Amino acid sequence: MHPKIHSCLTGGLLFATLCLPARGNLDEHTYSAVVASKPEAGDIVFVRIAGPIFSRVADTTQSWTSHVGIIVDYENGDWIVAESGVPFVRKTPLRRFLDRSEGQKFSIRRLKTEPTEKQKHAILMFADSQLRKPYSLGFDLESKKTFCSKFVHDAVYEATRQSIGEVETFDQLLHRNPGAPLQFWRAWFLGFIPWQRTTITPASELASPLLRVVIENNA
């Protein structure tokens, strides 16, 4: 098979696996606890999405979380989460966002220096400006496209000038974990891992000292 054809097929198969649906089926008792915790606009929501690509993100970062979004509004009886997902940035009701999480794992966290009403509105305006922006399959912080942790970082920073998460190269990220699935990432990047590319991960945002827990279920 011609190398270019093989690369296209490999990329297409990887993209298809990334889009596989996965549901955690959040139970009523757990969601009632979420409601009782009184989420607010500006809260950051971490979940664990199943499937080949997202499970590798969790494995690589040595964390249970593989996806993140941010609450931007409250409509029709539910909070609204803005998220960068495949294929583009969109808004999702919180219940549905949590329902996709494997094993009902989630953590809702809030900036310790809480955003003002003006800053919450700025987060909403930023999210609206990014709607339908394409997903960066290369997880490239410098790309004009976006991905979940870049999107959340940028939303918070644009509105509050607080920077959550750690900017790092793929070299730093992959070599920090001796068990990182390098073979998978070589295949994902069609043979050549972009070692000096900078990125930011849900795991590093989860670990941010700027955040405190509102409610979580990640045991």
Image: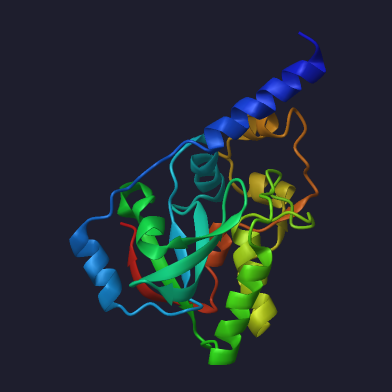
Residue 85 percent location from the top left of the image = 57, 51
Does residue 52 sit above or below 123 in this rendering?
Answer: above
The one of 27 and 90 positioned closer to us in this rendering: 90
Residue 163 in view in this figure: no
Query: Is 6 or 168 nearer to us in this picture?
Result: 6
| Quarter-of-image position of residue 164 | bottom right
Residue pictured at 51% horizontal, 87% vertical: 114
Image quadrant in which you'd find residue 161: bottom right
Q: Residue at x 28, y 54 (%)?
A: 26
Q: Nearer the viewer, residue 120 or 75?
A: 75
| 15 with respect to 74 (left or right) | right
Which residue occupies the extreme top position in the image?
1
Residue at screen point 58% across, 46% down = 86
Locate residue 214 relative to residue 3 in the image: left or right.
left
Residue 179 location in percent, x, y?
Answer: 55, 39
Query: Is 60 left or right of 47, judged from the image as shown?
Result: right
Q: Residue at x 64, y 63 (%)?
A: 151
Q: Is residue 36 above or below residue 8?
A: below
Looking at the rendering, in which quadrant would you find the C terminus? bottom left
192 relative to 148, above or below: above
The colouring scheme, among rainbow, by chain, secondary structure or one colour, is rainbow
Q: Tag count in the figure?
A: 0
Camera sees residue 42: yes
Image location of residue 81, percent across then percent down: 48, 66
Which of 9/201 is in front? Answer: 9
Q: Quadrant of the N terminus?
A: top right
Instruction: Residue lying at the far left in this picture: please name it.
Output: 29
* x, y percent for residue 31: 26, 64
